[in-house]
Each structure stands twice: as C-alpha cells, then as structure tokens.
Amino acid sequence: MTEKPAKTSVPIHELLARRWSGRAFDGDRPVSRADLMALLEAARWAPSCFGEEPWRYILWDRNRSEFSWQKAFDCLNPGNQVWAMNAPILLLALAGDTFRERGTANRWARYDTGAASENLCLQATALGLMAHQMGGFDADEVRESFSIPSDYEPMAMIALGHPGRVDGLDSALRERELAERKRRPLSEIFFEDSWATAMHR
Amino acid sequence: MTEKPAKTSVPIHELLARRWSGRAFDGDRPVSRADLMALLEAARWAPSCFGEEPWRYILWDRNRSEFSWQKAFDCLNPGNQVWAMNAPILLLALAGDTFRERGTANRWARYDTGAASENLCLQATALGLMAHQMGGFDADEVRESFSIPSDYEPMAMIALGHPGRVDGLDSALRERELAERKRRPLSEIFFEDSWATAMHR
C-alpha cells in the first residue's frame, strides 16, 4: 500500500495518521470473513446519542454474490466506478433518522453514523486493508434496488479491499494517489472561547 | 481510569476497543496544550466529502478562561452538569451545512463531523485522557452565547480531562460508570446483499 501518513504539527496516534482514502485496490484478493467481522465490530462500538446506534450497514461481497455487488456498483457515479471496480467489497452506511423507542427525530443520526464509519475505516487500516468512502452515488437508486425503508438515509458507499498496485490506475488517478494529503490550517477550524477566535498557544 | 474494553465477538484494534465515555474526571488536573493540539490534529485528519472539512470546534479551558468555560458549562443539561463539572476542558463540535465553494447544501456535514469527533476521542484515549460527547445541551443558548453563525450547527459538547476517582461520583452515576458496556447484536445492524438480510457467515 502507498503509505501517506498525515503530516501533523504534533504527533497523533499512528492508526489515525495512517488511515487514508486510496483508490488502488487489488481486485484479485478477497477480504476474509474474519476481517469483515472485525470491521463491523469496530463500527458497532462507536458512541451514539442516547445509545441509539442509529447506523446500519449493507455489505456486498463480489466473491459471494457477484450479482448483488454489481447492483450496488451500478449505483456509483462513473467517476468512482473507474477505480472502485477493483474493490471486492462494497458497503453502504445508512443513518436512521428517528429514535426508535421515542419516535422523535434523531438529529445526531448522521453524526453518529459518521463516527461508526470512521471506526470501520480505522479498523481496515489496522488490518492492512484500504477503505474509501464515497458520497458520489445515486441514493434514490440504492434505496430502490435494496428496499431501504424511508426512515434510513443512505450516507456513504464504502469501497474496501486489499491495496493494489498504483500503476494499475490511469495517470490522473495515479497522480492523485501519490499526491500529498492536505488539510485546512488548524486556525481555520479550531477556535477558543468563542467563534472565530484563534486558539491560544 | 476504569478500563472497560468492548467485549467484541472478534478482536478489534485496542484503541477502538478501549475508547469509552466515562464520567469520572479529575477536576484538579489540567490538560496540557500539547495534548489539546494532538486531539485537534486527530480531528483534522478525518476524511470528508469533497475534502470539505465541514467540522469546526470551539474549545474552553477552565484553567485559561474560567469565565468562558462557565458560560459553555451553563449550556449543558443539568444531568450532564453533575459530572461534567469536573472536566477541565469543554469542546463544541459544529457542522457547517453548506459547501463553501459551491454554496450548495452539504448533506454529509454531520456525518463527516461525527468522524472528526471520533478521531478526537480516540486520540484522547491514546493519550490516557477521557472524552465524553454529549447531545444534552441547549443548542440555541450556545449559539447565542458564542456568536455562532446560522450555517453552522452545534452537534455535540465534549467533556474532556484526565480520568479521576469513580468514588467521586454519586451512587447512581458510579453504577453506570462500572456497568458493562453494551451494544445491539451485530445481526440487527449489519446486513448482506439487501436490507434486513442477515450476514452470511
């Protein structure tokens, strides 16, 4: 795998620094059921508001059910299909927008589901797998294709697999794959005492 | 710190297993600036849709500005105040609901912000700190108190500090602090091939 640890101003845990969203998958190497279980367990133990666990995941394993995998793949935007075609696993993360016992709106559903998916991706990193979340897919199509109830919102498709050779990507994607990872400066994102007030050092 | 590693059906990375939302903080021990920077860096390197990085954080450090910390503390629900009073740091996670360059709605803003906060909490675990996210706070009051613009949504207050003695909590909270961590069974949360279809083993 291309290693692109985050260039941080202070050290962070290596698992957090190493996670990144690559595109070069090894299309010939399946993901074991044991690894998949570990990914799902990692997501399961994320925190959630009132312990609701509003996240749900649908898994498609090309080596188990190519037909279903293809149907999920067909929901991806073409720009994602060009590289996700080599991912043996696709996952969909969904957020349930109602507290099931109270019946009221859960305004943390997406927030909590994002945390669960981050856990899943970090566990992938820990196992030497690569996970790449995508917002670019047709949510209506995925809802229809897989009978998703109206109170669950499809949030992200996740391409998952073992890392593959970068030179399997076309030149534009290869360039992105090797480019340095970037983030906004800390001062744009983190404030102290009030909005838009820079952190004290 | 009370250690309550998740009881998982298969092993997951120890950082993910060890993170949990305790309530027993050491009120006398400040959090160093170096540790705070590491937490914020960890959040910063979360993934986001189109690289938007929609998350923002406001930090309140009781040992730097007691007045501001108190103002943030006053926004918490009473049920959280009884234990968060010992947290030397409060943070607010906010999600920006518009893509800044495109000007269109960002339906992943909360999802991505949840991932950033999970990174922050995991980094806290890595540093021997404890982070506890709270949905129970008055979002309108916090918006007004800290001049938060209308296109950012206050999602979670986070109590942060070094772990303290469990017997500093009242008996009901102490019981919660020592209770086993629980999650829904995997089969309720994870499906394969289609909605509500159990995963194949």
Image: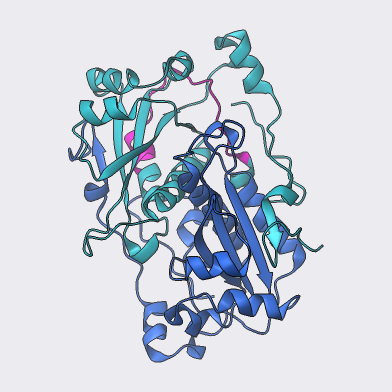
Chain colours: A blue, B cyan
Above or below for A170 versus A30: below
- Tell me: B62 left or right of A34: left
Dominant secondary structure, magenta: loop
Q: Nearer the viewer, residue A141 or B159?
A: A141
**Residue A35 in view, yes or no:** yes
Task: Report the magenta residues as a range.
Answer: B18-37
Query: In the rendering, at what x and y percent does residue A73 appear?
Result: 57, 77
Residue lying at 30% horizontally and 23% vertically, measured from the top left: B72
Q: Is residue A59 magenta?
A: no
- Quarter the C terminus of chain A occupies: top left
Q: Nearer the viewer, residue B35 or A155?
A: A155
Question: Which quadrant of the figure has residue B169?
Answer: top right
- Tell me: A57 left or right of A198: right
Query: In the rendering, at what x and y percent does residue B12 appear?
Result: 68, 51
Residue lying at 57% horizontally and 44% vertically, measured from the top left: A54
Question: Which quadrant of the figure has residue B103?
Answer: bottom left
Query: In the rendering, at what x and y percent does residue A96 appear?
Result: 55, 47
Q: Nearer the viewer, residue B141 or B51?
A: B141
Residue lying at 76% horizontally and 62% vertically, measured from the top left: A34
- Tell me: A163 left or right of B38: right
Total number of numbered labels? Answer: 0
**Residue A133 in view, yes or no:** no
Above or below for A156 versus B82: below
Above or below for B200 versus A26: above
Residue lying at 48% horizontally and 40% vertically, measured from the top left: B121
Question: Which quadrant of the figure has residue A28?
Answer: bottom right
Above or below for B108 versus B160: below
- Quarter the N terminus of chain A occupies: bottom right
Query: In the rendering, at what x and y percent does residue A16 appear?
Result: 48, 54
